[in-house]
Amino acid sequence: MADEQAQNEKAWESAEHIFCEALDLQESERMVYVEKACRDVPELRGLVDSLLAVHQGTVDDWDDAPPGGSVRLPALESSGPRTGEIFGRYRILHLISAGGMGTVYEAVQDKPQRSVALKIMRDDLISADSMRRFNLESQVLARLRHPNIAQVYDAGTVDRAERVVPFIAMELVPGARSLDEYAEEFELDRVGRLALFAKVCDAVQHGHTRGVIHRDLKPANILVDQNGEPKVIDFGVARVTNGDLKATTRQTSIGKILGTVSYMSPEQCAADPDEIDTRSDVYALGVVLFKLLTRRLPYPIERVPIHVAVRVIQQDPPTQLGSIDRAFRGDLDTIVGKAIEKNKQRRYQTAHEFAADIRRHLNDEPIAARPPSRIYQLRKFARRHTALVVSAALVLVLLVTVASITTPLYFTAESARAEAESARAEAETAQIEAETARDDALAEARKSAAVVRFLIDTFRVPDPERAKGNSVSAREILDQAVERIQTGLAEDPQTRRNLMLVIGEVYSNLGLYRKARELIEPALEEFREESEPFNLAGAVDLLGEIAWLMGDDAAAEPLLLEASELRRTQGAAVEPNRRTGPLRSLAALYTNQGQWDKAQAYLDEAQAVFTTTDHTDSAEMAELLGQRARILGARAQNRRARGKDPTALLQQAEGAYKESLALYKLHREGRELNMAEVESSLGLMLKFQGRLDEAEPYYRSSIEKARTFVGEEHPTYAGIAHNFAALLESRGKHLEALPYSEQAVKVFENTLEGEDHPDLMIIRGKLAALYFRTGLYAKAEEVFEQNLPHQLRIQPAMAPYSLVEYAHCLTVRGAYAEALAMLEEAGHKFDLHQGATHPDKARVHKRLADLFLATDRPDDALIILTEGRALLASVSGYDNADASLVRRLGQVHEARGELEQAEERYREAYEKFRNLMPGSLEQQAAQTLLGRLLLERGKLDEAQSLLTEVHAELRASWGDDCEWTRVAAEGLEALREAGGD
């Protein structure tokens, strides 16, 4: 076998040498040389001919060939596992694909039971070099943990037919389609394709920040799953940039350049490893996006020899995106052109910069790829802030209209004055009337002209040269406008207050509620003094809505009630959407307060307005349906909190949200943010029903819409992010959830009114819990300490839950006396607010058991755990909580030296978590403890299997710093010392 391997390697080296020598000859001389060179080793001829065929472009599809054009000698071909065959701990189901480094199968893992993509190295390529590359691949992939990168579960070797065959078990992407196939099959529009591609950039950036260059990015290596989430796969040709791996990858020879030529950067084509860096991946991403948008490549090289393709990529200009479709001219042409610049210094320097410009384009913001001109900035501002710019346009129209009225009035006045000279008594009255009309018209014209001058001056963007490349944001333009209102329109109070109302509404739409409130409050006082009923109603309504959005219900309620009365008085003179605005805001306010009958009454009144004005098939009706669903959802949560079955109400809420979403899809223009809110709420209803697989796609669609249309600093995005984090937490994806929760807290701290706001306490509590569950105990303590005083005062019924987790942070830190006192306080508060027999009180028992185990008091822990299980035994739906107590009972028995009982408890907990929460940290903790105990009891084979599996999962999910990862690693080290490997 070793002789065959050496012969194989020698054949490859010889074939490559002959191939490279042949390329230096004229075509007429080439085949004569090949025939002569292969005369003594005839089996080489097939391989050399295959390499020449790839070079000459006669292979049908490069994407189907092994990376780099490698072709195997038929005589050296070896067979892999067959369907149904057992390969280590995996049963082969069927072949997925074959590549240069190995073959990928769909397989089923035994423990835990799951489907995987099993990559097995080609056993005819087993050599020191290929084994080193395969080992590097597994190291690389183990360091990449991102929702848009295929996760690695396991890596190792299997003895097969007297060979040691390496393998990697990876996440199987369900319903996988390549990026291009998915976009075509689901008929994604430009926005959908760009939003999807931006996520791919995020995944590649994650790899880059961990020192990994993919080097083979192409549509076939970017899969999209059945939920519409991209997954970057196959880092098998990755170059690792940190020190210990760099030396190895530098040895990649010119004859083994990996990657698909069409997507290779000029520096990759030059085959100099020192020139290849993360910007090479940026180039490949640019080509991927070009093809995603146009279905074509930027260079027509599909059917040319390799050396020609290389020359084209290195020297010829690419096709411009805008020349294929005029719709791509402007931003997209600039963005893609920058990504595929031949000079890597002129490209985006990171995948993050690339994604950021795409999202700026989607948000109608100026992109970074070129200095924004005045017209360009104004166009972007207009698209993002239609309300303000439409107001300006309306003022311009008004000016023209006023001018057309003023001119004839002026001449009428002059004529009347001439007639008065001959008939003073009769003309005196006419003169007065004419002069009054003239003065009024000219006054209106002056006001309109003042508004136009104000808007022109406000929107005048600084010259790019003087601005030194700094763009002017919408916020800066609005801030300048406010300053000019105060100074430039001081002598025109009516125009000033009207503009304050308009700009205040734009601030509100941007989520800048405090700025909006500061602007509208003084305007409102002026509207009251001047008795302008229509503007007064608008100002009161808007200020009430802003107060509610800031969580200031005490200020919001009287304002919204006043606005609703003003709108009722105005009746049909006001269009239905504005007429029902305060009614819908009151319904939302009362829903949050739990006054559902009141909320429903206001919704009924609003619906009556839409029905009588023939607006039943409209986006406004979709909003009403969403609000009805919110009431049903709130009632369901209340019913659940009281220990009653909420299923019927949850199903009704789900139906109403789906009806709302369907109606929004018919009237989606300008309503994408509303759709995002409904999708998030629908996901919440599905989550409450335990249908997490169905809920997650709605959440992901919702978060992407919110990010695209308002950005991550907007309160609506923050609310959706908070709910999404809660879902991810429920699925055990704590690390993925953490940044969403952190962003929600950051935004709401700047938005909500007062530290005592209940919503702020809830989201801070969630963040503290996430820090706690991810082992960031110091951060968790900090948030608990900040939040608890407010929670104890405002939300005392929620405080015991926080106290329990805060106490465990103290236990981990070794502050046992403080932790014990806090747990006792939590128990008293559970008795007071939830009742002494409420099953949630078992949380106190669990953390008391942890404290007693940490302080070597297993007997006390046994008593407290037995009491906790008794609490849970009387109710259903708390199986997870019971399994958690069972696992700790195993620890108690182990501490007492009762190893047989400990093993029984660990197995019971492990099996429960495998069924209830597969892949969760709870399951991994139970598996780790069981494996460690089996090692201690001499059951080495089972211990080896459990600890190897769980260690790989823990590293992939939680990293090496997780305490359970360290425990599993220590167990494996003990196994090695015991001869268990």
Image (cartoon, helix red, strand yellow):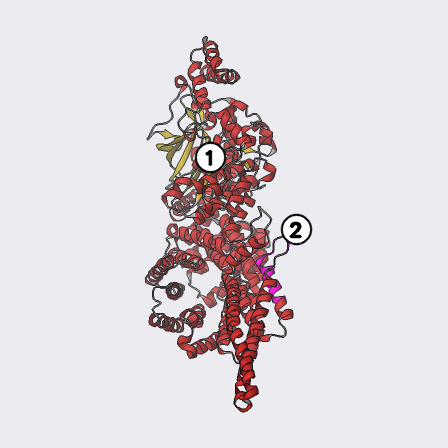
On screen, residue 590 above or below 892: below
Q: Which of marks 1 and 2 is nearer the N terminus?
A: 1
Residue at 57% x, 32% y: name it: 276
Magenta region: which residues?
Answer: 462-483
Q: What residue type is labelled 2?
A: Glu
- Of 40 and 769, nearer the camera is 40
Quarter assignment of residue 564: bottom left
Residue at 55% x, 78% y: name it: 438
Label 2 belongs to which residue? 465
On screen, residue 221 above or below 649: above
Label 1 element class: loop
On screen, residue 742 above or below 218: below
On screen, residue 645 above or below 493: above
Image location (x, y in percent) of residue 926: 45, 45
- Looking at this view, name the residue that lies furthest to the right: 466
Q: Which amino acid does label 1 sit on?
A: Asp
